[in-house]
Image (cartoon, helix red, strand yellow):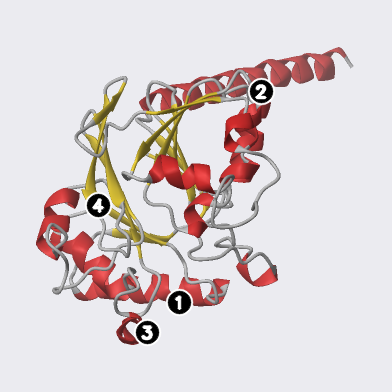
């Protein structure tokens, strides 16, 4: 009996040591992360909840980026921002939030009225991005074209919401993370963003139509230069090459064009984004596999993934 008790004590000590080493290892790995990206909304145009979108998600565009310094940056206020707001309030991380807006089309703004931090007095939200982004967020509450679209007025929000207006004319620096932008080829315009932190680079470009007939400042060559050697490129890939001809001028790309941009820019990882609303999970997966075949044909080592709602990437 004493021998058995001795063995159990030894095993308990051993297991505790393993747990401690595991926790220390996880902590040390966490310290190596430059930034963490989480997808709260990956869908384009309109939310599509349901059994056919449980893998890649049905919420519209919203990303949470946690910088090395610990500060939170959100890209776009699609329907995915609702659940992100709940999480930030629960973790008491609502006092210092940067919200970067690519543009103000409905699917990128209509989650904002349901973002809980805007109703809390302790929240401080710094808005930047496209030139009309602040006006667009206000219009989800107050729009003189109709007799009220939401029961609360923008001026009644309790959070302190500040428009920085830095990215239209230059760079935004958040504790050493430098963010710059490039104009989108998309109706009514918009901005794509590049995050540079130490020697790591993340590029986010959605709602962007790649093509030779692009507007000034939006040619494939200019996007290649902007994305050059990025560790991660998240790019609009809403359509297939067969679908794109009937959707010219809509401001979106097919997966082949997104891959060619990433390949020409020597990007390490390409994330296919802004999934088409009728695209069910199996079809999104098929597009990912077709894109990987393109990489195989080019003998490219690029990692290719379709963005999944709820997934995280550490850079």
Nearest to the observer: residue 261 or residue 218 = 218
* Residue 236 picture location, percent across and down: 35, 63
* Residue 83 picture location, percent across and down: 64, 43
Q: Quadrant of residue 197?
A: top left
Does 181 sit left or right of 225 as displayed? right
Q: Looking at the image, tell me whether mark 2 or mark 4 is earlier in sequence order.
A: 2
Determine which of the numbered discs, if any, sits on residue 268 in the image: 4
Give how far apart the Cα atoms at labels 2 and 4 are.
Answer: 39 Å
- Please tell me whether mark 1 sits on a helix, a strand or a loop: helix
Determine which of the numbered discs, if any, sits on residue 243 in the image: 3
Nearer mark to the viewer, of 2 and 1 = 1
Q: Which residue is mark 1?
A: 286
Give how far apart the Cα atoms at labels 2 and 1 are.
Answer: 43 Å
Q: Quadrant of residue 48?
A: bottom right
Q: For the point 55% across and 65% down, which residue is it?
A: 46
Q: Quadrant of residue 168?
A: top left
* Residue 218 picture location, percent across and down: 16, 60
* Residue 301 picture location, percent across and down: 24, 60
Q: Residues within 10 Å of mark 2 (few under 14, many from 20)?
A: few
Q: Is residue 240 above or below residue 23?
A: below
- Whether label 4 touches label 1, CB < 8 Å: no
Q: For the point 51% across and 50% down, which residue is it?
A: 109
Nearer mark to the viewer, of 1 and 3 = 3
- Whether label 3 touches label 2, CB < 8 Å: no
- Please tell me whether mark 4 sits on a helix, a strand or a loop: loop
Q: Residues within 10 Å of mark 1 (few under 14, many from 20)?
A: few
């Amino acid at each position: 009996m004493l021998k058995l008790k001795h063995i159990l004590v030894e095993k308990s000590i051993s297991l505790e040591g393993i747990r401690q080493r595991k926790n220390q290892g996880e902590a040390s790995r966490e310290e190596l992360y430059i930034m963490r990206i989480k997808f709260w909304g990956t869908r384009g145009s309109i939310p599509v909840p349901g059994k056919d979108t449980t893998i890649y998600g049905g919420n519209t565009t919203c990303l949470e980026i946690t910088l090395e310094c610990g500060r939170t940056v959100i890209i776009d206020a699609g329907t995915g921002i609702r659940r992100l707001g709940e999480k930030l309030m629960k973790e008491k991380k609502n006092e210092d939030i940067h919200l970067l807006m690519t543009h103000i089309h409905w699917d990128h703004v209509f989650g904002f009225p349901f973002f809980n931090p805007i109703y809390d007095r302790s929240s401080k939200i710094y808005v930047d991005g496209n030139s009309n982004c602040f006006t667009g967020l206000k219009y989800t509450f107050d729009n003189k074209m109709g007799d009220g679209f939401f029961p609360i007025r923008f001026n009644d929000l309790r959070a302190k919401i500040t428009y920085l207006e830095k990215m239209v004319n230059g760079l935004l620096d958040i504790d050493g993370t430098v963010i710059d932008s490039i104009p989108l080829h998309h109706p009514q315009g918009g901005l794509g963003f590049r995050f540079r932190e130490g020697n790591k680079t993340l590029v986010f470009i959605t709602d962007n139509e790649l093509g030779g007939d692009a507007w000034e400042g939006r040619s494939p060559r200019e996007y290649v230069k902007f994305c050059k050697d990025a560790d991660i490129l998240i790019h609009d890939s809403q359509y297939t090459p067969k679908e794109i001809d009937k959707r010219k001028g809509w401001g979106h790309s097919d997966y082949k064009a997104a891959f060619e941009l990433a390949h020409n820019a020597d990007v390490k990882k390409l994330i296919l984004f802004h999934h088409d609303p009728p695209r069910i999970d199996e079809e999104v997966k098929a597009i990912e596999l077709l894109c990987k075949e393109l990489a195989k044909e080019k003998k490219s080592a690029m990692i290719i993934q379709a963005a999944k709602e709820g997934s995280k990437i550490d850079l």
